Every structure is written in structure tokens, then in C-alpha cells.
Image (cartoon, grey):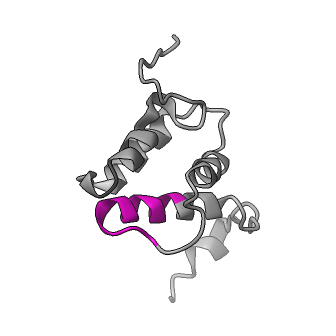
Amino acid sequence: MAIRYVSKHHSEDDPGGLIQEALAAGPAFPGPAEDLLLAWSLRLAPERDAATAAGRLLAAHGLDAGPLPEGAIGRLVALLREAADSGQRPSAGPPRRRGGRRGRGSPAD
């Protein structure tokens, strides 16, 4: 099933133009930024990397560096920066599983 968005701000990095609409509102954006970011991330195509998309959105709007705006829009920009940065951290690798008796601890513990 394909979803069609009618927003003129729709893009692969911003399905439905949610982020663009919020940024256009500026200080009038009421928030909560966390809800908007969640809605944005759920709309991204499964093959679209959220960190890359967030980085491109920030760069396109000149918000990838510098001081944060005031209010809820500043919180949204901060969250987008965190999302963009999450793709640049080295992976620690898969978690190690400890099974058997050692994983459960001894009865004396």
C-alpha cells in the first residue's frame, strides 16, 4: 500500500512535510517536539536512514550548527541534531549473550 501525501513540502527525507511545516512556523510551533519527531520517524520509508535524513533536513535549513532557536522549535532542532549524530557514532557491535549457569549467577549469589 502506497501512501500519498498532499503537502507541497513532501520529500523522501520529510514525508508529508512535517518538519518543514514546523520549521516554517518558527517560534509559533507549539510542540511537543518529541511527538512531531516520532510522527516524522514513523513516516520515513523503511529503507530510509533516519540519521541521514535528519542531517539532510538540518543542512537544508541551515540548522546543522549554531545556537538553538528558543522554545519548542529549538527542542525540535536539538532532537533532529541528536538523530543526525546517532548515525555517526561507531557501533559497539552486537550485544553479547551470556547463557547457561554463568549468565544466571550461582545460587550462592
Where is residue 107 shown, x and y percent of the image? 51, 82
Q: 100 or 97, which lies in front?
A: 97
Q: Give the residue displayed 51% in from the left and 89% down from the top.
A: 108
Q: How many marks?
A: 0
Q: Is residue 25 above or below residue 27?
A: above
Residue 70 falls within the magenta-colored stretch = yes
Main SS of residues in magenta: helix
Q: Give the residue displayed 48% in from the left and 30% down from the top.
A: 9
Q: 87 or 12, which lies in front?
A: 12
Where is residue 96 shown, x and y percent of the image? 71, 66
Find the residue positioned furthest to the top. 1
Query: Is 90 placed left or right of 26 in the picture?
Result: right
Q: Give the residue displayed 49% in from the left and 75% down from the top.
A: 67
Q: Give the residue displayed 45% in from the left and 41% down from the top.
A: 20
Where is residue 38 shown, x and y percent of the image? 41, 46
Q: Is residue 47 above or below residue 88?
A: above
Query: Is 81 placed left or right of 25 in the picture?
Result: right
Query: Is 108 placed left or right of 75 in the picture?
Result: right
Which region of the structure is painted magenta?
Answer: 68-80
Where is residue 42 shown, x and y percent of the image? 46, 37
Q: Quadrant of residue 102?
A: bottom right
Residue 98 falls within the magenta-colored stretch = no
Q: Is residue 21 above or below residue 63?
A: above
Q: Quadrant of residue 68?
A: bottom left
